Image: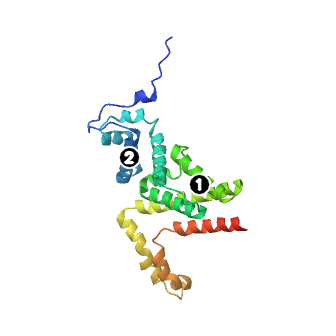
């Protein structure tokens, strides 16, 4: 019996230009998938539609990825690459962690539909691993014991991803629905009488001013303050 020859991954990849004159690459497919998610949402990201957008047959995608879920994990790793691009440590652990948290949050919000699809995934891909190594290195370098470093890292990364999903869900809403939600604070909460809702009425101007903005920077500062207090005790 003849043993079936295994075709190396590099040999499976398309080197001829597509109908649009592009030579397909891993990065081009991921970038095109991100654009499709932005324009059509997760339901619009299929191998057939991706192939059409690339000017190639749908089967071409599988020369680069084991399946659509493999592509989703690659998209998630690309978001981490965007977050870490050109980042440089200052040597001040709290400032560095704050900057990284805001970068991760911002990178996901730049692609809201992708955030909803990928922020809950663990990829084990190079950019995700590199960011985790960096965060843990900052914490251990600041003097946290390993158990504390892992505990704070866990809270830090889950907090950034949870807020990314929450805030991305708002951005992904159709514009009329998002605008209607934003107006509720002014049109409903700000009009509640002090007789029935004394606490809301007393804080209504502050609620109107804050509640349509992300609470992530505040939550991040609270987490870092808690960690800092532990380090100094």
Q: Dot 1: within a 10 Å radius of its alpha carbon, few (fewer than 14), some, or many (20 or more) residues?
A: many
Spatial separation of the CA atoms under disc 1 and disc 2: 26 Å
Image quarter where the C terminus lies is: bottom right
Q: Residue furthest top?
A: 1
Instruction: Give coordinates of residue 99: x percent, y percent.
Output: 52, 61
Image-quadrant location for residue 141: bottom right
Residue at the limit of the structure toward the bottom, as seen here: 195
Is 224 rendered above or below residue 186? above
Q: Is residue 65 above or below residue 81?
A: above
Please tell me the numbered disc located at residue 135: 1
Residue 120: give x, y in percent of width and height. Answer: 53, 52
Quick check: 170 left or right of 23? right
Query: Mark 2 = which residue?
Result: 31
Q: Measured along the vertical axis of the image, is residue 53 above or below residue 179?
A: above
Q: Position of residue 31 (x, y in %)?
A: 38, 46
Residue reaching furthest right?
A: 233
Label ID, residue 40? none
- Which residue is found at the position 32% from the left and 40% from the top? 54
């Amino acid at each position: 019996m003849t043993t079936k020859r295994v075709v190396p991954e590099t040999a499976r990849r398309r080197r001829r230009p597509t109908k649009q004159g592009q030579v397909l690459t891993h990065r081009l497919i991921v970038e095109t998938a991100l654009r499709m998610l932005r324009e059509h949402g997760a339901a619009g990201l299929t191998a057939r539609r991706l192939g059409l957008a690339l000017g190639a047959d749908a089967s071409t995608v599988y020369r680069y990825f084991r399946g659509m879920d493999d592509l989703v994990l690659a998209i998630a790793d690309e978001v981490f690459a965007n977050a870490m691009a050109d980042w440089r440590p200052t040597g001040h652990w709290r400032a560095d962690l704050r900057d990284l948290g805001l970068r991760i949050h911002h990178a996901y919000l730049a692609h809201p539909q992708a955030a909803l699809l990928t922020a809950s995934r663990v990829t084990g891909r190079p950019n995700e691993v590199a960011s985790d190594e960096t965060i843990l290195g900052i914490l251990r370098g600041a003097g946290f014991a390993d158990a504390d470093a892992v505990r704070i890292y866990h809270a830090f990364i889950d907090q950034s991803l949870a807020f990314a999903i929450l805030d991305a869900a708002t951005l992904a809403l159709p514009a009329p629905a998002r605008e209607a939600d934003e107006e509720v604070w002014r049109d409903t909460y700000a009009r509640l009488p002090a007789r029935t809702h004394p606490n809301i009425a007393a804080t209504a101007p502050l609620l109107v001013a804050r509640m349509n903005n992300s609470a992530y920077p505040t939550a991040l500062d609270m987490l870092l303050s808690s960690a800092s207090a532990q380090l100094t005790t």
